[in-house]
Image (cartoon, helix red, strand yellow):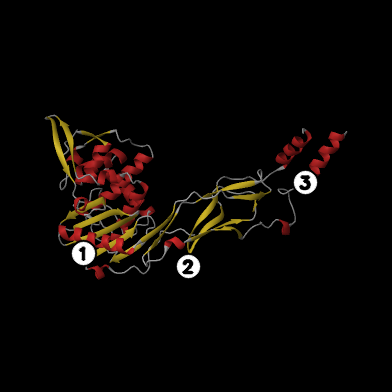
Amino acid sequence: MKKILALLVALAVCLSAPGFPVRAEEEEAAGTEPAEMGAAGTEPAGTEMADAPEGDSLGITAPSAVLMEASTGTVVLEKNPHEKLPPASVTKIMTLLLIFDSLSQGKIRMEDSVTTSAYAASMGGSQVFLEEGETQSVETMIKCIAVASANDASVAMAEHIAGTESLFVDMMNQRAKELGMNDTQFVNCCGLDAEGHLTSAYDIALMSRELITKYPQIHTYSTIWMENITHTTKRGTEEFGLTNTNKLIRQYPYATGLKTGSTSQAKYCVSATAEKDGIELIAVVMAAPDPAGRFSDATALLNYGYAKCSLYQDLEEQPLVTVPVRGGVQEEVRGEYDGTFSYLSTTGEDLTAVEKKWYAMEELEAPVEEGQEIGKLTYTLGGSEIGNIPILAAEAVERAGYAHYLGQAFGYLML
């Protein structure tokens, strides 16, 4: 009899518990304003600096140029950044990005053999003289593209990944769209002059940033100065030497890549990456009048950046955040930080003075969706907020139903 009474009491509690119909004024979500969790400092960076100075102040000879900091995407200096121009072999940055995308997705492997088609072997311009039917590993093809700017290797890889170069170019344009490269239209995968094959210095910086931040291993290849590959064909086996087209690898002490390009229409282009004191910069130069000019312009941009820029990065392990859940199948939900925070200063601010504060909802009403924002970590400097990182629900929490509360009730009876 006592157990029956206990069961009836438990059911009564269930019917009055969160998760069952209540009056309208009781259904409003709790905790709509974040509550401060504790003091300590911020907000996501990665937006273009609106007041970036013009490149003419540095005497940049090229008609178009951009200097971007990689971790935040901040444009530090610019000159006609959105002028649409032919990019020549700088195009291959997108080709390499799609290759590394395919590697990360498990669609291809570094040791896979890639067969050169007659079409790929017919590419003119910069090449490593692959022959029809010749096979090379994916990794060797990457070296040929990144070091020697090989058109034949680029087309061979495009065909290996997408079946045809045309389908691969569709992938390039889709990836460009996803990155916000609004000035760009690719017509081929290697950068040979073609009607409508255009991009801008800003868009090149965007795709360069995506490649070096998502796949930093690209620097393993873009910093090779000289290396041999082996051709194995019907004629036998012979060595072929690769030499980096990016002279900054030898001339600039902090250079890490990335890609050069030149054609009669594009003139001389480069996307130059460098890293010093933890700051990674991207200097894009388009349509320079001569080879030396593109490298001197890139050097001037990089030197300017390292003289002006200081970077705050919060790499500390952040404390665990949990928020109570009302009416859910579990009592709380764990938060996860949506990335790490970086802040670029070009004004000499004291970045040791950055402060952090954690905010979280006081309570959430079930159901809670995975990825739902439940708080934020804010960063301030000199009393002003310089950025923040959202704190997201690490898992979904369903709304509790009758079965959940009945299970709880019977659990109590078994104690």
Q: Which residue is mark 2?
A: 382
Front in this rendered view, residue 84 or 12:
12
Circle 3 or circle 1, nearest the eye: 1
Q: Residue 121, located in which quarter of the rendered image? A: top left
Q: Amino acid at mark 3?
A: Leu
* Residue 122 in the image, given as x and y percentages of width and height: 16, 42
Residue extending furthest toward the right = 1
Q: Quadrant of residue 406?
A: top right
Say which element carries label 1. Answer: loop
Q: Nearer the viewer, residue 117 or 114?
A: 114
The kind of residue tagged 1 is Ala
Residue identifier under label 3: 15
Callout 3: 10 Å neighbours few (<14), some, many (20+)?
Answer: some
Question: Which comes sooner in the sequence, label 2 or label 1?
Answer: 1
Q: Which residue is mark 1?
A: 62
Crowd tier of the residue under label 1, counting other residues whose Cα lies within 10 Å: few below 14, some 14–19, many 20 or above: many
Query: Residue at the location (39% across, 57% down)?
Result: 72
The secondary element bearing badge 2 is classed as: loop
**Residue 98 can be seen in this image:** yes
The x and y percentages for residue 213 are: 36, 50
Secondary element type, mark 3: helix
Residue 307's image quarter?
A: bottom left
Residue 317 shown left or right of residue 172 in the figure: right
**Amino acid at pointer 2:** Gly
Q: CA distance from mark 2 to mark 1?
A: 38 Å
**Labelled disc at residue 27:** none
Farthest left residue?
Answer: 235
Identify the mark nearer the N-term, 3 or 2: 3
